[in-house]
Amino acid sequence: MGVLTSWASRFRLRQYVKASLWIVPMFGFVLGALLAELAVAAEGADWPPTVWHYSATTASGLLTAIVGAMVALLGFVVTIGVLVVQQATGTLSPRYMRLWYRDRLQKAVLATFTGTFAFAFSLLRTIESDSIPDLGVTLAGAAVAISLVLLLIYLNRFTHSLRPVAIAELVSRMSEDVFTHGAAAIRGAAPRGDETMPSDGPVMRIRTQRGGAIQAFNVTALVAEATRHDCVFVVTRLIGDFVPPGTVLVEVHGGMSKPDPARVTDLVALGAERTIEQDPAFGLRILVDIAIRALSPAVNDPTTAVQVINYIEWLLHTIGSTSLPGRYVLADHRGRPRLVVPGRNWENYLQLAVCEIRDYGSSSVQICRRLLAMLDGLLDALPQPQHTPVHAEMRLLQEAVERQFTDSARRAIAQQADHQGIGGQY
């Protein structure tokens, strides 16, 4: 297939565009130059008003200043971006950068700056002693005003949104949205019993030619391809797994004809790292990373970890309220099983959310009390079938507390559930 004809290639291209910080600003640059030409063409005797007419010297000086200011502001925003990267990778989670690069406000600011630069620079060449683009100069001034307003909004946004609790809320909302909508094609498929699983061995194993993290499946196309060959595809790896070249990605069971391996693998997107489109566990991974970094002896900030646990609990309540069989069998329009996709069950999500925070935070009274309150809340809110893994995590937490707190008085304090860690009601 061609470079961009496969679904996987188009998916990777969309991911690149979402994370790119230069594509939208480049569109702004081109748009600014085109608008400058339109402004010159629209220049008329009756517009703009007389009070907005400029001399050649004034117009040239103003546009020159605007060009210089936009270059300086671009450098300023890039500097802020570098500082964000340093802070996020050092004190938060490098995986958060995967989401930060997608911020639309930052791209809008950069596009406005490059567009204003191109607009003003293009007008400069049209200035002559007897031909002054008064309308264009006025619009350039208005563009500067808009750029400054956007810059203030940008600074306010990132001054507040770089706090760990703000990032935790953002990641939780994105993960919840993916869980309830983005992964519905897989999670929403009605799971069938073991009798629908192929009982014979695979007649064909499809291996990936390239390595990478599994970012997404084209579920609809995989079902259609299996239907076309009257077979069943069994996917062997989870979304988020890293697969080296040569890994068996899909097992083919039954069938009237053999599918083209390249056609099948092109329906599975691989990339350098995980992405959140079909992988809500990736968001949970980011939250846990932020919490355990706060628990590092070099940082020693359990209160931040408690704040992140608040949003982990929020996400767990959403996940735990949904039936998660751990495997999904998707059927064609006739109800025949065509695609078997592995999925995470409730226990997988709960272990991801709790294990590392418990291990790194078991010496903190605040963390132990907050984790116990979270687990108590899950028992109270979730249906009975979800309770067994929660009880297992509570036992592990109890054992960790007993190992860390040898004196009975401190151990008794650590074993009290508290939604604030320390200082709340229990």
Image (spheres, helix red, strand yellow):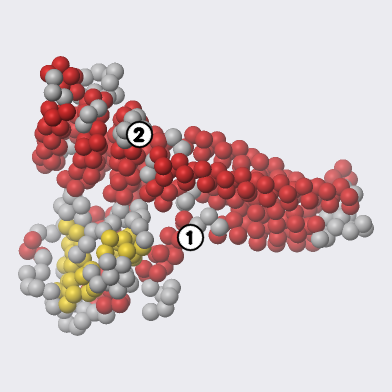
The quadrant of the picture occupied by the N terminus is bottom left
Q: Is residue 376 above or below residue 155?
A: above
Question: Residue lying farthest bottom?
Answer: 257
Front-lying residue, 94 or 353: 94
x, y (%) of residue 45? 88, 54
Residue that label 1 marks? 17
Q: Is residue 368 left or right of residue 112?
A: left
Q: In the displayed structure, would residue 5 be above or below residue 73? A: below
Q: Label 1 neighbourhood size at 10 Å, few (<14), some (14-19), many (20+)?
A: some
Tag 2 residue: 298
Dot 1 or dot 2, earlier in sequence: 1
Residue 325 falls left or right of residue 124: left
Of 401 and 112, the residue lying toward us: 401
User: In terms of secondary structure, where does tag 2 sit?
Assistant: loop
Position of residue 49 measured from the top left corner of the image (x, y, whole percent):
85, 46
Q: For mark 1, give the secondary structure.
A: helix
Kindly identify the residue that appears in the image at 21 percent across and 79 percent down. Answer: 229
Residue type of the residue flagged with mark 2: Ala
Give the residue drawn at x 65%, y 58%: 29
Q: Tell me where residue 69 appears, x and y as whole percent.
A: 71, 46
Can residue 162 be seen from the camera position used here? yes
User: Residue at the spot x=44%, y=65% of the render?
Assistant: 13
Between the C-alphas of marks 1 and 2, the distance is 36 Å
